[in-house]
Image (cartoon, rainbow, N blue to C red):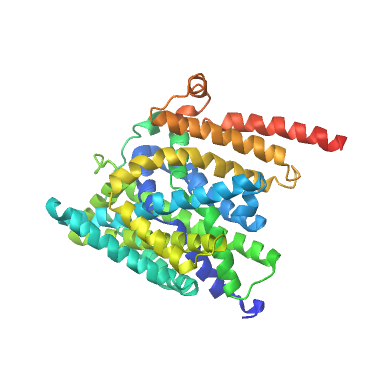
Amino acid sequence: MKETQFGKKEFFIISLMLFSMFFGAGNFIFSPMVAKDSGEFFYFTILYFCLTAVALPVLGVAAVAKAGTLKELASRVNPLFASIFVIVIYVSIGPLLAIPRASIMPYEIAIAPFVDEKYNLYTTLIYSAIYFILNYYICLNPSKMVETLGKYLTPILLVLILIMFITAYFSADLQIANAQGKYLKHPISSAFIDGYQTMDALAALVFGISVVAALKGYGVQHKSVLSILTVKTGLCAGVILMIVYVFLGYLGYKFGLMFNDATNGARLLSSISDYLFGKAGIIILGLACFLACFTTTIGLIGSAGVYFESISKIKYKYWIMLWCFAGFLVANLGLTQILKFSVPILIAIYPIAIILIILSFLNTIIDESKIVYCFCIYTAAFIGIVNALEMNQIIIPFVTEYIVKLPFYDAMLGWITPSAAAFVISYLIHFFYRDKA
């Protein structure tokens, strides 16, 4: 296909594909809880939530597009770090966390409530087996994946969410709960952190390759054009993502007081759907959640398959088979167990990803200095790892006791101040030796 044949239709198909990859299990349940818990601060907190849940992932896609690949971006630190970091990212948001979490979420919301506890193990096995067989089939043909995600599944998902929003908007008087918990004292940082935990900044680093591959499939070959179109599709996906977050958040904002006892986003949305549509509401919610999760796992499995085929002699189809099987095994541990061990892993990895994205946009200013990259990345990694270990009651003598005193540490952002200091010091060192050279 010639490059000039890439038009608006193809642009929106790829934009919707990227949106559908981002919008998975965590995305579906976080913004309603942000709205419910922040109460009267909703319109304020949703913006800060979107900073880390929308803006950062879009920047991540752009960062990878500018660098070429995630490995090229991470190699600005050093090749060994790049190899390890890319594998850790793929495994963490792949079969270890995001894939099984997303796969089992629809089951927990829409199927488990109707299943007798003594049969839960068997129905989980059957459901997850069917789920991953379907994932494997679609991932076998990446071009077909683009068509499926962008042309069919995503519009259905958007329509379902729109129906819920419109029905809620006209259904009853507004009932706003007062801000509670962490949102009562720290609404800004709490919203920022909840967006941080959607994992999309990590996902953005691996989804970039799928966008570039899809663009090439439509005949776009020049690197500069690929970079520009990747950024544009990322922005388009980000706008759609933000609108959806506001819609879903509004549900929690409007019905927060009515369902104030809901302990998580899944239960809150389930209660709202049941209130709006009766028993049919659970089916609608389950279908919407299934589509969101299904498209995300397809994106993750496909991206991982492409990458690991490129660094090994094992073919793509065997990698996606392995990823599906691993996801199947972890998914059967249950959602509660998956969420329990996911938080410390994210706390250790996320600061590295954020700093890497930020530095990619300062790359020209810092002359791609390895000194700056190493100082900042290793500082963020060190703080993040200490934080993660401390969450698991693992204390490093003479280290943890000082790290916990850092600004913003209680908000899981203790890496910010040391990383900023590392940037200033390393840039001064780079600037001094650059001028001496």
What number of labels is visible? Answer: 0
Name the side, left or right, on which 398 lies relative to 269.
right
Which image quadrant is residue 177 in? top left
Query: Which residue lies at the image location 60% right of the left edge and 71% below the top edge?
Result: 216
Q: Residue at x 57, y 63 (%)?
A: 310
Horizontally, is 71 left or right of 298 in the view? Answer: right
Residue sitting farthest toward the front = 313
Note whether 417 is above or below 146 in the view shown: above
Q: Tell me the residue at 46%/51% (across/down).
A: 91
Task: Work out whether residue 280 or residue 411 is closer to the camera in this orientation and state it.
Answer: 411
Quadrant including the N terminus: bottom right
Extreme residue toward the right, this view: 436
- Closer-to-camera residue (202/123): 123
Residue at x 14% of width, y 55% of height: 119
Whole-percent x and y of residue 389?
A: 44, 31
Q: Could you say which is closer to the camera, residue 76 or residue 252?
A: 76
| Residue 236 visible at all | no
Residue 194 % position (x, y): 43, 41
Asked if residue 316 lies left or right of residue 426, the reply is left
Image quadrant for the C terminus?
A: top right
**Residue 37 location (% of width, % of height):** 35, 38
The answer, for residue 106, to whether it is visible in the render is yes
Location of residue 430 in the rendering, given as x and y in whole percent from the top left corner: 77, 36
